[in-house]
Amino acid sequence: MDPYQITLHSWGKVASVYQDYFMDLDLYNDTYDAFCQAVYKPGARIFEIGCGPGNITRYVLANTLVDSGIFRYLRHPLYASLLYLAWGILLKNPTPELWIVALLVSGFLYLTARADEKECKAFFGQAYSDYMTRSKMFVPFVF
């Protein structure tokens, strides 16, 4: 076997064992919450440096409303990109079939975004409602 493949395989096994032991650290969630409350500042950024797997950053991001960067303007940038793609394909080649596809894609993405927003309102409360008034769903400054 190729030495490169042996090394890759060995690291893969070690990484898998490491992940099993250290990635789900619910034991520390209260500490993470206390940390986030202690450094609370709108738009604050935390840079995690260390040799760990990034579980602190993962926890903080999963429990933080992100409203900076593209999210300052759009609540659903990934869905927006899929809408732009569907309508771009239609505009490049307007056929009856592509009209149907673009309309279906638009409808499903809109319904999915509304369902996401319902979950976000339940999780983040008034903070998400305020965010909805400052940002648009799919098209910056428009919709």
Image (tube, rainbow, N blue to C red):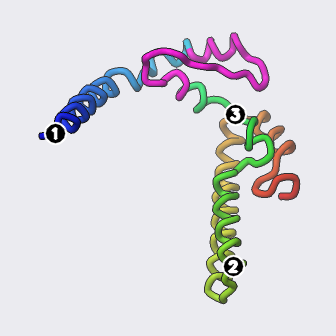
Labelled disc at residue 92: 2
Total number of numbered labels? 3
Residue ID at (83%, 38%)? 130
140 vs 59, left or right, is right
In the rendered structure, which segment of residues is drawn in magenta? 32-58
Amino acid type for the residue under numbered disc 3 = Leu
State the image coordinates of residue 127 (x, y, percent, origin top left): 78, 33
Residue 60 occupies quadrant? top right
**Which residue is situated farthest in the left direction here?**
1
Q: CA distance from mark 3 to mark 1?
A: 46 Å
Q: Nearer the viewer, mark 3 or mark 1?
A: 1
Residue ID at (70%, 62%)? 110
Q: Is residue 78 magenta?
A: no
29 vs 51, left or right, is right
User: Circle 1 sits on which residue?
Assistant: 2
Decide which of 39, 46 is in the foreground and name it.
46
Decide which of 79, 36 is in the foreground and name it.
79
Q: Is residue 39 magenta?
A: yes
State the image coordinates of residue 35 (x, y, percent, origin top left): 62, 12
Decide which of 32, 53 is in the foreground and name it.
53
Q: Is residue 96 above or below residue 3?
A: below
Q: CA distance from mark 3 to mark 2?
A: 37 Å
Are dots 2 and 1 in contact, CB under 8 Å? Answer: no
State the image coordinates of residue 129 (x, y, percent, origin top left): 80, 41
State the image coordinates of residue 142 (x, y, percent, origin top left): 87, 57
**Label 2 residue SS:** helix
Amino acid type for the residue under numbered disc 1 = Asp
Residue 105 occupies quadrant? bottom right
Q: CA distance from mark 2 to mark 1?
A: 48 Å
Around disc 2, counting alpha carbons within 10 Å, would you say few (fewer than 14), some (14 to 19), or many (20 or more)? few
**Which residue is situated farthest in the bottom direction here?**
96
**Label 3 residue SS:** loop
